[in-house]
Image (tube, rainbow, N blue to C red):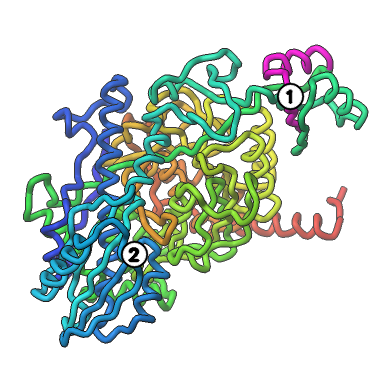
Amino acid sequence: MSRRPKWRPIWLRWAAAGAAAAALIAFLPWQIGLREGDENGANNPPSGIDAAQEKRLKTAAVRRDAEATARLCTLECFKAFRALRADADEAKLRHLLDRHPHMAYVRLTAGGGKTAEAGVMPEGGGDAWSAQLAKAEREAQAGRAYVSDPIRRDGHRYIVLGVPAAGGAGTVSGIIRQDIVDEVERRQRQFLRLVPYPAEGRYKTESAKPNSTEDITVRTGEDNGSASHYHINEAVVRFPGEPADAVIQTIMKDIDGASVRKLGYAYVFTSHSKETEELIAYFRERWNPVYVEPHYLYLANGSEGRAPKAEGAESGNRRGVKAQAKNAGDFGTAGTPDRERSKTRAEDGAADTAGGPIVPNDLLYEAYQWNLPAIETERGWALSRGSDDVVIAVLDTGVQLDHPDLQGRITEGINLVGEGDPDDDVGHGTHVAGIIAATVNNGEGVAGLSWRGRIMPVKVLDSSGSGTTYSVAEGIIWATDHGADVINMSLGNYASAEFLHDAIRYAYDRGVVLIAASGNDNTDQPGYPAAYPEVFAVAATDAGDNKAPYSNYGDYIDVAAPGDAIASTYPGNQYAALSGTSMASPHAAALAGLIKSVSPDLTNEEVMDIMRKTAVDLGDEGRDIYFGYGRIDVKRALEAAEQTANTLGGFRLKFERRIEALRQRFGVGRAA
């Protein structure tokens, strides 16, 4: 039976909100609480929905969360505008635009009529921009916030925003570019598998039934759930022994070879003229390989979701809507003593000896981050907030390396699908990284699960959100060799590749905790790498502890974690609300890092076992195919890790591992 988390009446913690924040409510559509099944009048069973229902739910989710992302953008800009004083000069305005590239133009008008401005009004608006800005200033002068309807110009989406300046002695108005809304919608239609994906890109690929080269045609998004994709002129081969250079030359001549690459035990051969089936037949006939298989394509497992419903925010209930928006608009300027105590604990590093919740002051936390309280993160932080010694590798589309909410949290990474730094050109990897490690209690944006620890960005997916078996395997090996303690893989394919499994085993045998998303096709078809036995597989839940309608399921699922409408960092110094098992997986990866911070000597299997044993049972009693062992619980997991570290067995384990480490370091064998 599903359990609903206890929502805190967050508005009771706030003494008051500013008049401008309250006025903002009238212009923002805060009806953000539709649950799966709302449209049909009842909740559907976890997998008992047909293709038409699934498509309808996914389409509605994309639409609603595009709107939620727009609200995140508006609130973040609102807070930045409200921080400006009427005497701010042009240099401060330019600095504001530098930190917020989506702000196209900003104007500050002092009480005496003196103005300062920065940026450029978009072309094509004519007098319309001036009229909108004048209206925004009039509303702000009356102490009210103003948000225009979306404005389309030359393929871009804009809003005009106006607020009273700090101290009420002037107004701040501006034009905000919200291209993020269209980008998120377009990307997530792919990642949620509403359209055939990958439809095109730099890869010459074929769609096939999983674990075969039997051709199928992917005409709709629904067809993605039973398809894998591979490179039509390539094959991956592992030989019984290391082939001599002469053997490689012979092979390249036989197959009309274009290129050959080696990683670990395996080789990837590309032919100018032969297709995969021919290559597989050739290697089996001539070289008796350990395995030969297609070179599969791996796709990001993200999707656009919907924002959760907070207590009191019933659809159409204006009173509840206002209460929630009022909290979101206050931005921490009128916190209660509880909030101030939380801030003090966060700043001085002191533990909350009473075990009470620690509530951060991050801008979007109270209104949008339902996910962290739902898994008892606030109480878990009293036990550990992480360690700078723990490194979590994010194998994904890269990370925005200079995002303000990730400053100081990123360590050395690598780009394995192109040149240059592992910067994010999709958004998926930055969102995943923020769930794990967005800076906590800085009054900005969102809070990550871990206050300390580092993100290792490993770019294995390109600008289409796709990557190869080779790039993913190379990423796993590189991250392992460069000190990753945990590897998060919010990506997958429905074909089991021995080449990738070799890399998985390489990392697992070296103690790395491997976490992967189950996939977003609402299918029991095993997805990889999640279904490998060495990998910890994560399904997605919504705010009511229900199975998310898109989440894959099966007997390989270890646990579930929040995946619906997760607010996190996004490229361009922005924030987005996304859903998917891609968003669930980093919750578990972050928890693994927190466990390692409490008890560094635990093995990877012990870390995974703690997460399984401390999960909150959902669905059928005991382990089931939808939730695995249940939904993760940060407090219970860290208590178990702490207990393990403090037992006599734990001390003995640490001693034995320390001795073994010294033996290996100095080359001393065991006594006979």
Crowd band around label 1 with a 10 angstrom C-alpha radius: few (<14), some (14–19), many (20+): few
Establish if 408 lies above or below 393. below
Crowd band around label 2 with a 10 angstrom C-alpha radius: few (<14), some (14–19), many (20+): many
Structural distance between the alpha carbons of marks 2 and 1: 48 Å
Nearer-N-terminus badge (2/1): 2
Which residue is drawn at the image coordinates 35% and 60% (left, top)?
379
Residue 285 inside the magenta-drawn segment: yes
Residue 349 inside the magenta-drawn segment: no
Residue 371: image x %, image y %?
33, 51
What amino acid does circle 1 point to?
Answer: His
What amino acid does circle 2 point to?
Answer: Met
Which residue is drawn at the image coordinates 28% and 56% (left, top)?
124
Which residue is drawn at the image coordinates 75% and 54% (left, top)?
660
User: In this view of the protein, which residue sits in the foreground, 321 or 191?
Assistant: 191
The residue that mark 1 highlights is: 272
Among the 4 quarters of the image, the one containing residue 497:
top right
The local secondary structure at tag 1 comes to: loop
Q: Which residues are magenta?
A: 266-286
The residue that mark 2 highlights is: 103
The local secondary structure at tag 2 comes to: strand
Residue 61: image x %, image y %?
28, 38
Establish if 57 lies above or below 324. above
Among the 4 quarters of the image, the one containing residue 498:
top right
**Label placed on residue 160:** none
Residue 228: image x %, image y %?
53, 24
Q: Is 354 on the left or on the right of 410, as rendered?
A: left
Establish if 65 lies above or below 27. above
Residue 649 shows in the view: no
Residue 664: image x %, image y %?
80, 55
